[in-house]
Image (cartoon, rainbow, N blue to C red):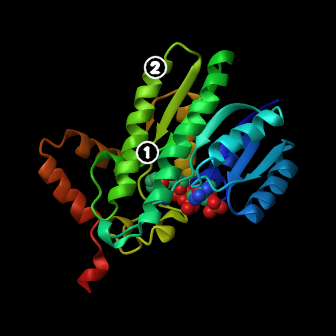
Amino acid sequence: MSYALITGASSGIGLELAKIMAEQGNNLILVARRINLLQDLKVSLEEKYGIKVEVRVADLSIAGEAKALYEFCQSRGLQVEYLINNAGYGDYGQFDTMKLETYRNMLQLNVMALTELTALFVNDMKQRKSGKIMNVGSLAAFQPGPNLAVYAASKAYVMQFTEALNFELRGSGVTVTLLSPGVTETGFVSRANMGDAAIAKGALMDAQSVARAGYDAMMAGKLNVIPGLKNKILALGSKTMPSREILLRISGSLFKDTSAQH
Ligand SMILES: NC(=O)c1ccc[n+]([C@@H]2O[C@H](COP(=O)([O-])OP(=O)(O)OC[C@H]3O[C@@H](n4cnc5c(N)ncnc54)[C@H](OP(=O)(O)O)[C@@H]3O)[C@@H](O)[C@H]2O)c1
């Protein structure tokens, strides 16, 4: 029986992706740390859509957890047709004020777990000549992110990695899609403590629309999707900016801490 595996399915964009995949009749493997949220979601999706939902509690910021997740799927004979690497977080503030442990965890989750899960599942997909992967990046990947330096760099990795992999996979029957959301109304902003960042002050996109854009792109086998017109314009501005210094200054003002102005 084939499944869609979604990391970070307990809230935000991952939760909305789980609902969309379920609505389309896909069986699910839901992964996150908060077991109660995953269990409640399992019950409601199984009841509503008559699908099978497996729950796997995992802290993917711990080395070895991605491999253990793959082995869990293998041991239960769960064939992963869709892999959605969505779990991730940022931490807002000046680079030197953060704990080193925060960066280790963030890079393990945003970069290493995503890479390992892709490496483990892509081989099975290639053998079957079928499968779809979605990596959740960010608009933060399109330029350096002062006050969000490590997070933005981690998402730049996700962008470059996904684009290169997409090229390598052409003709294999397997596709990989990069979803690059702008600031979205989820638990992300509060976990990152970035409520006072200038960029988080305007109207935010809702997680449902972001998930829908990602789902449509993944199903169509598209490489890139940036949900929302404002976000598309911001990304285009970053890509076409002739001067890195000007780009950095604009980015510096978008990620500025507005609480310092009061
Ligand atoms: N919201 C935004 O503004 C925004 C913008 C651009 C990109 N993104 C990206 O979108 C993705 C989803 O974030 P979101 O906005 O939906 O935020 P969210 O509501 O905070 O969701 C994050 C999800 O990741 C899971 N997660 C966090 N740490 C984990 C860990 N160590 N191990 C396993 N799962 C973990 C969380 O579940 P548990 O806490 O239960 O583990 C949760 O389900 C992230 O990759 C984020 O970087 C978000």
Please give the name of the residue rendered at 84% of the width and 36% of the height, measured from the top-left corner.
76
Asked if residue 81 is positioned above or below residue 15 in the image, the reply reads above
Q: What element carries label 1?
A: loop
Q: What residue type is labelled 2?
A: Glu
* Viewer can see residue 94: no
Coordinates of residue 158 in the picture (x, y in percent): 43, 41
Of the numbered discs 2 and 1, the one sitting upstream in the chain is: 2
Residue at the farthest top position:
171
Image check: 251 left or right of 242?
right
Label 1 crowd bin: few (<14), some (14–19), many (20+), radius 10 Å: many
Q: Can residue 31 be seen in this view?
A: yes
- Measuring from the top left, give residue 168's x and y in whole percent: 46, 20
The quarter of the displayed image where residue 26 is located: top right
Q: Residue 224 carries which label?
A: none
Can you identify the residue that label 1 sits on?
180
Kindly identify the residue that appears in the image at 82 percent across and 56 percent down: 44
Quadrant location, the C terminus: bottom left
* Residue 77 locus on image (x, y percent): 82, 31
Left or right: residue 195 versus residue 68 is: left
Q: Mark 1 CB in 8 Å range of ligand 1?
A: yes
| Residue located at (20% from left, 58% from top) | 250
Q: Which residue has dot 2 on it?
A: 168
Q: Label 2 to label 1, Cα distance in Å?
A: 20 Å
Q: In this view of the protein, which residue sits in the foreground, 25 or 178?
A: 178
Which quadrant of the render holds ligand 1?
A: bottom right
Assess disc 2: are there few (<14), some (14-19) or many (≥20) residues with their C-alpha within 10 Å of its C-alpha: few
Callout 2–callout 1 Cβ contact below 8 Å: no
Q: Nearer the viewer, residue 241 or 74?
A: 74
